[in-house]
Amino acid sequence: MDPFKNSALTSILVISNMAHAKEFYVKKLGAKIYREYGGNSLVLEFLGNWLLLVTPGGPTKDKPETHFTPPINKHKVSHSFTIRVQDCKQSFEILKERGVKFITPPVDHGAETRCFFHDPDGHLFEISEYRQQ
């Protein structure tokens, strides 16, 4: 028996400012709004996946010792997203025109060209083009 039959995986990102996050994910990355509720949660469909943006919060009855906080230091990463693209340099230029700030321009590593950016709260994203050798 499959415990996840007909299920979907959602990634939760804790953000500090809902307006800034909404602007970034919808206007710059092209995510689609699925649902907003309470002014502190936003469900997005992004590249066939679900992202749930939430503002910081403390423990609840079902997670009594858990605190939701945005990243403290964007230079120390415990989770990141990789977006496989057809043309890394072209995707970089489009996102750069939309105001996305990259750590570096695309770097060619032979079979792979990639570059990285952060969302307004420091969550790390990579765009990567892989070419068969």
Image (cartoon, grey):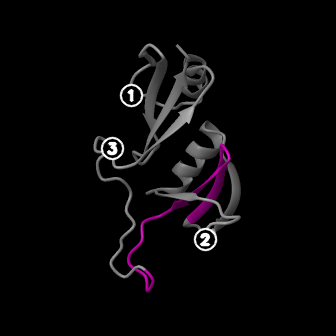
Residue at x 36% of width, y 73% of height = 66
Tell me the distance, in whole angstroms, between the alpha carbons under discs 1 and 3: 11 Å
- Indicate the position of residue 38 as horizontal and vertical percent values: 60, 72
121 is within the stretch colored magenta: no
| Span highlighted in magenta in the image | 41-62
- Indicate the position of residue 40 as horizontal and vertical percent values: 54, 67
Between discs 1 and 2, the one toward the N terminus: 2
- When asked about the image quadrant of residue 129, the answer is top right
Mark 1 crowdedness (10 Å alpha carbons): few <14, some 14-19, many ≥20: few
54 is within the stretch colored magenta: yes
Q: Amino acid at mark 3?
A: Lys
Determine contact: label 1, label 2, CB under 8 Å: no
Q: Which residue is mark 3?
A: 74
Q: Amino acid at mark 2?
A: Pro
Classify mark 3: helix, strand or loop: loop
- Indicate the position of residue 101 as horizontal and vertical percent values: 46, 30
Mark 3 crowdedness (10 Å alpha carbons): few <14, some 14-19, many ≥20: some
Residue at x 46% of width, y 56% of height = 15
Is residue 25 positioned above or below 34 on the image? above
Q: Which residue is mark 1?
A: 103
- When asked about the image quadrant of residue 130, the answer is top right
Q: Which residue is mark 2?
A: 3
Tell me the distance, in whole angstroms, between the alpha carbons under discs 3 and 2: 35 Å
